[in-house]
Amino acid sequence: MMASRLLDVYTPIPLNLKRGEGVYLYDTDDNAYLDTYAGIAVNALGHNHPAIKKALSESSQRYLHVSNLFRTDSEELLANRLCQHSGAEKVFFANSGSEVNEAALKLARKRGREISTEKTEILSVSSAFHGRTSGGVALSGTAEKRAMFAPILPGITHINFNDIDDLNTKMTHNVCAIFLELIHGSSGIYPLSETFINEVKRLAKENDALIIIDEVQTGLMRTGTMFAFEHHDITPDIITTAKALGGGLPLGAMLVYHPHEQILKPGDHGTTFGGNPLACALGNAVFDVLETQDFQQNLMQRMTYLKSRLEAIVSDYPALFSELRGKGYMWG
Ligand code: PLP
């Protein structure tokens, strides 16, 4: 194979992929591989799903891109569905998880500054992952990465994982928001404890800080409910989501709850490609499937089966496994 001209930021698996179908990828010799990566948690409906292909074909006949100088029906419809499923008031679309986390950061700091110029501190949990942009790296728990790209975005403090005392020490009136990844995905599937989540809720209220839940991995039924926050007694101020949302095309969404939907005004934030009509049409196709009872029943059965089999493996091999953590289709 020709020497790759792609920057060496990845260590790709050496397979020549020809096509995908359902849960399988096929190489050029037609060997089938069970695709457990699913495009890094993107292909929620599998490869080559008929609903996605139909939306792709129909939407591409209309226009591919018009920018946010115009409203498009696919974008409006998808925003409506996201609000219906989450209870949020308004949606901002971008192209990735990192970008919607950046948007949430900006919204939170703008709101904080309107209350007091000191209220710009952000809390995040160590070992959480929130993306690879400068803001994403600053929010994420990987200290080596933060050091590698220093100086990074200031004003972000990390709390030790599930450490209530640390949370109590670091949450002050100067905190404008706390980012939560309810089940830490990239660091190896570590769920935040119920006590920690409840304490975040109490302290955020006491200090008038926004709760921003990063559902980039956990959103769109990955844990059995549309959003993972539904498993807990907590209402977010902002949800960020991406991954499965664009049905394979780049799409992220920031879901903003009332009364914070008025914070960002025309000109405060934006994007060239975010909310692209084709990506949103695919997003609507994803929802067309996720919303059906058949899909949900089937999903619940499979999730229950996966859990029971994993529990059996963990208990059968105590020398290899110490515990099973997670929910739905997110297990460590
Ligand atoms: N937040 C979480 C929880 C993620 O898992 C990821 C990506 O894996 C991101 C943010 C960043 O998303 P993206 O890679 O789309 O920028």
Image (tube, helix red, strand yellow):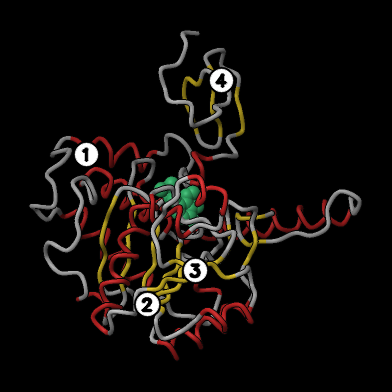
* Circle 4 or circle 1, nearest the eye: 4
Residue drawn at the location 50% of the way across and 45% of the way down: 148
Provide residue 203's location: percent of width, then percent of height: 50, 86
Question: Mark 2 belongs to which amino acid?
Answer: Cys
Location of mark 2 (residue): 176
Is tag 4's residue or tag 1's residue first in the polypeptide sequence? 4
Q: Estimate how packed mark 1 is, as few (under 14), some (14 to 19) or many (20 or more) residues with alpha carbons within 10 Å.
A: few
Provide the residue designation for mark 1: 58
State the separation of the CA atoms marked 2 and 4.
46 Å
Residue contact between numbered discs 2 and 3, judged by CB atoms under 8 Å: no
Q: Which mark is residue 15?
A: 4
Mark 4 surroundings within 10 Å by alpha-carbon count, few (fewer than 14), some (14 through 19), many (20 or more):
few
Quote the CA–CA distance across marks 4 and 1. Answer: 32 Å
In three-dimensional space, the C-alpha distance between marks 1 and 3, rounded to whole angstroms, equals: 46 Å
In this rendering, which labeled residue sits more in front, label 2 or label 3? Answer: 3
> From mark 2 to mark 3, how far is it between C-alphas?
12 Å
